[in-house]
Image (spheres, rainbow, N blue to C red):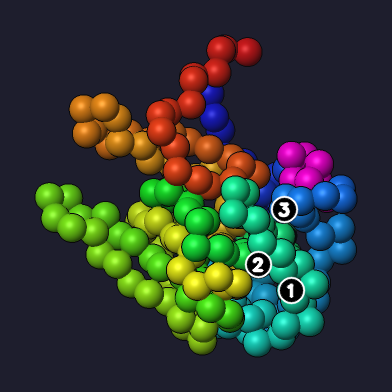
Amino acid sequence: MTQNPSAAERSTVHPALVDLTGPGPGSDLVAAPVPLPVPLPGRDLAPAELATLAAAVAANPDLWQHHVAYDDDHRHYASLWRDAHVDVWVLCWTPQNDTGWHDHDISSGAVSVVQGTIIEHNLRVGGPEKVTQAHAGTTFSFGPEHIHRLTGLAAGSVSIHAYSPPLWRLGQYVVNDEGVLQRASVSYAEELRVLDALPEPRAAE
Ligand SMILES: [Fe+2]
């Protein structure tokens, strides 16, 4: 049974991310978090506050520029900050990168595009999806009710993401062979991507 983590547990880094700090391609976690350019209130942040934070980090390339790298097969990203109330990431996009449909469980979020263009897709039941291009300089935020999919558009795109409470579990959506939408709960340490089928259920431990 999955239990809600404590704030202290949320502030710790998933071991799978620590494993990614080694050399080579992929995504990484910063051993020493960057100093954030805005003071944090010591509580969970609302979407508008996350937008302010993401935009402030975006405006300070020294905080994230050295993490920029691109990979068509495995979207490159790095954690910049993680505490009990908020986590901040830099994500790098190629036109091939695609998160697939997902939600953020109980977290609100904000995205600030600093370079290039990404696309936010929102699912409409019985209608065509809503498609919004987010160009460099654009910041948008959302609450935990939000379901979306992000894809790269321009080569060499970069975005800063902030979430509160920090990501822990996310919902990843799959459309099965009958066209039925299904949800899988995944760890924040897993790369969001398009899934062809739900993961096999884990055996009881
Ligand atoms: Fe998302």
Ligand 1 neighbours mark 2 (CB distance < 8 Å)? no
Q: Which of 12 and 74 is in front in this view?
A: 74
Residue 60 colored magenta? Answer: no
Q: Position of residue 94 (x, y in %)?
A: 56, 63
The label on residue 150 is none
Classify residue 146 by image quadrant: bottom left
Which residue corresponds to the image point at 53% horizontal and 23% vertical from the top-left? Answer: 1
Which residue corresponds to the image point at 38% horizontal and 65% vertical from the top-left? Answer: 120
**Which label's residue is closer to the chain start, 3 or 1?**
3
User: What amino acid is found at the position of numbered circle 3 in the picture?
Assistant: Ser
**Residue occupied by mark 3:** 27
- When the figure is inspected, residue 139 is found, relative to residue 80, above or below; the finding is below
In the current view of this chain or complex, which residue is farthest to the top?
204
Residues shaded magenta: 15-21
- When the figure is inspected, residue 119 is found, relative to residue 103, above or below; the finding is below
Say which element carries label 2.
strand
User: What amino acid is found at the position of numbered circle 1 in the picture?
Assistant: Trp
Q: Which of 93 and 64 is in front in this view?
A: 93
Say which element carries label 3.
loop
In the current view of this chain or complex, which residue is farthest to the left?
126
Name the main secondary structure of what is drawn in magenta: helix
Horizontal side, residue 128 vs residue 83: left or right? left
Q: Nearer the viewer, residue 62 or 188?
A: 62
Q: Where is residue 194 in the image (x, y as percent from the top left)?
A: 45, 43
Which residue corresponds to the image point at 81% horizontal and 41% vertical from the top-left? Answer: 19
**Which label's residue is closer to the chain start, 3 or 2?**
3
The label on residue 90 is 2
**Residue occupied by mark 1:** 64
**Which label's residue is closer to the chain start, 2 or 1?**
1
Residue density around tag 2, few if under 14, some if 14–19, many if 20 or more, within 10 Å? many
Ligand 1 neighbours mark 3 (CB distance < 8 Å)? no
